[in-house]
């Protein structure tokens, strides 16, 4: 055995045995959690959640609209696919709006804020003109476009408030004016109250609630002081109570909370109770697609406001939880986009859109479950109605554009795009080989052996 440099015999060290793996390293649950956490923290997670979640909700909504509206269409002496075809047309147009909004730069979104607001105000005022506005279910919030097509301008008022409010607050933040309460409120709150007034002239309390939620979301994101926030909230609450007490229909909806019989005293709770019946009869996996009983004339508005009840009856608890999970993922992705950006406009716009979609989903589902009064608002991206679908899909395109605009997401997307014919950074002088053409012929040549011709 050779000696050491000092002349001393080498010291024989004991062979170190590998330490037994600890329970934390071999725990499959912990490994799964680590992998999920890493995948969840990737730059493109929000982008895929928004794109995939919104598309899944829209496609599932089309299926349920077709199933829930067949009987209603036949009762009106129309083809069974009448409402489905109209919704499909709106979804195709909405997909174009989504793609266009997702490709627009942030500057163009800000430039569109004032034109959209002016157009929404003009159309909402036009609704009240006799001969132009159309009343549906007691609410005059529609404009007839000819034939069977109508438009509800108040739905575009939500998008207008989000874009215009985000641009206004972002400009004031750049000028450091948000520390003064008058700049925090004016002109945001007066313009929002003007939109609310135009909506309430038609009697649409549900849309007014959603618009109020967007206003409070923008104020909260802008960092409104607690006193100011509570003051505006209290004022809006008092106005809401007065509006509810002034209408027998709204008071009747409030009295139907928790009702288990269709006729609860002098109040008719037919719609609320039959929505609960539909959910209860669905069970875990439902009665099957198209096999709903309540849609045969028992449940009013089965394809619009109460489509979630038909979903629970036909797809069961599994179907309703899937819809809830998709909306939860969409809401999380919107919050993540708003929280990770450095652009004030992106933060406020993403937060406003997320507040809009989440609040409307909660109000619709809560009404179907009997936890909230029936407000008459559709389930976003899911219920029948082109007027609600088009601005919502444009708002989803906004979120997609904002998710793509993050620096890490932008770098990840550019790395995944093929760059044909380009050279790697540094060129030939850096010692790296120039990038080869990424063609099918090159890949096929690389796959053959050296002797094959």
Image (spheres, helix red, strand yellow):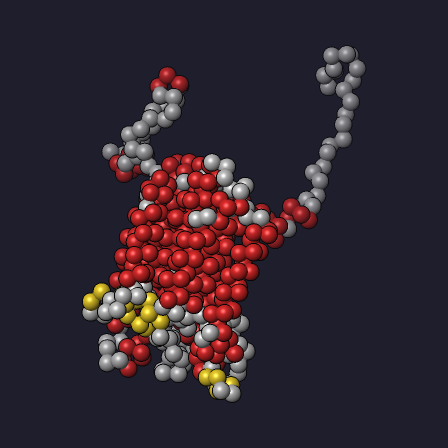
- In the rendered structure, the answer to whether residue 184 lies left or right of residue 79 reads right
Q: Position of residue 406 (x, y in %)?
A: 44, 40
Evaluate whether residue 311 shows in this view. no
Quadrant, the N terminus: top right
Number of marks present in the image shown: 0
- Residue extending farthest left: 147
Evaluate whether residue 288 shows in this view. yes
The residue that appears at 37% across and 54% down in the rendered structure is: 159
2 versus 289 height, above or below:
above
- Residue extending farthest top: 6
- In the rendered structure, the answer to whether residue 25 lies left or right of residue 64 reads right
256 versus 430 height, above or below:
below
Q: Position of residue 158 (x, y in %)?
A: 39, 57
Quadrant, the C terminus: top left
Q: Nearer the viewer, residue 281 or 360?
A: 360
The residue that appears at 53% across and 65% down in the rendered structure is: 238
141 versus 227 height, above or below:
below
Q: Position of residue 32 (x, y in %)?
A: 57, 51
Q: Position of residue 445 (x, y in %)?
A: 29, 34
The residue that appears at 51% across and 69% down in the rendered structure is: 241
The residue that appears at 73% across and 32% down in the rendered structure is: 15
């Amino acid at each position: 055995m050779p000696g050491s440099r000092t002349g001393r015999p080498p010291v024989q060290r004991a062979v170190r045995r590998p330490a037994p793996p600890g329970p934390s390293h071999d725990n499959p649950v912990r490994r799964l959690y680590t992998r999920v956490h890493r995948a969840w923290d990737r730059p493109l997670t929000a982008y895929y959640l928004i794109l995939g979640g919104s598309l899944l909700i829209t496609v599932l909504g089309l299926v349920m609209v077709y199933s829930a509206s067949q009987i209603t269409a036949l009762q009106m002496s129309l083809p069974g696919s009448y409402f489905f075809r109209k919704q499909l047309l709106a979804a195709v147009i909405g997909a174009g709006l989504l793609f266009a909004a997702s490709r627009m730069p942030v500057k163009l979104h800000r430039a569109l804020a004032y034109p959209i607001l002016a157009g929404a105000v003009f159309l909402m005022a036009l609704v009240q003109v006799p001969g132009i506005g159309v009343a549906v279910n007691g609410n005059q919030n529609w404009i007839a476009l000819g034939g069977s097509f109508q438009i509800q301008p108040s739905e575009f008022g939500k998008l207008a408030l989000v874009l215009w409010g985000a641009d206004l607050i972002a400009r004031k933040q750049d000028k450091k004016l948000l520390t003064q309460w008058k700049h925090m409120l004016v002109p945001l709150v007066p313009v929002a109250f003007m939109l609310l007034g135009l909506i309430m002239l038609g009697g649409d309390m549900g849309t007014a609630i959603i618009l109020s939620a967007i206003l409070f979301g923008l104020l909260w994101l802008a960092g409104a002081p607690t006193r100011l926030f509570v003051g505006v909230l209290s004022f809006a609450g008092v106005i809401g109570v007065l509006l509810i007490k002034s209408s027998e229909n709204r008071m009747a909806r409030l009295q139907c909370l928790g009702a288990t019989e269709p006729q609860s005293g002098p109040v008719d709770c037919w719609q609320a109770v039959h929505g609960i019946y539909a959910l209860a009869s669905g069970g875990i996996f439902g009665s099957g697609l198209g096999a709903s009983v309540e849609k045969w004339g028992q449940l009013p508005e089965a394809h619009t406001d109460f489509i979630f009840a038909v979903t629970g009856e036909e797809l069961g608890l599994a179907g309703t939880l899937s819809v809830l999970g998709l909306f939860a993922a969409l809401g999380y992705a919107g919050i993540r986009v708003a929280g990770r950006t450095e652009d004030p406009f992106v933060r406020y716009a993403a937060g406003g859109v997320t507040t809009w979609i989440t609040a409307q989903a909660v109000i619709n589902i809560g009404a179907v479950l009997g936890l909230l009064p029936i407000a008459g608002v559709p389930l976003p991206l899911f219920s029948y109605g082109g007027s609600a679908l088009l601005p919502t899909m444009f708002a989803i395109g906004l979120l997609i554009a904002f998710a793509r605009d993050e620096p890490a997401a932008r770098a990840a997307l550019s790395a995944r795009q093929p760059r044909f014919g380009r050279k790697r950074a540094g060129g030939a002088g850096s010692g790296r080989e120039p990038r080869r053409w990424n063609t099918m012929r090159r890949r096929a040549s690389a796959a053959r052996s050296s002797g094959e011709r």
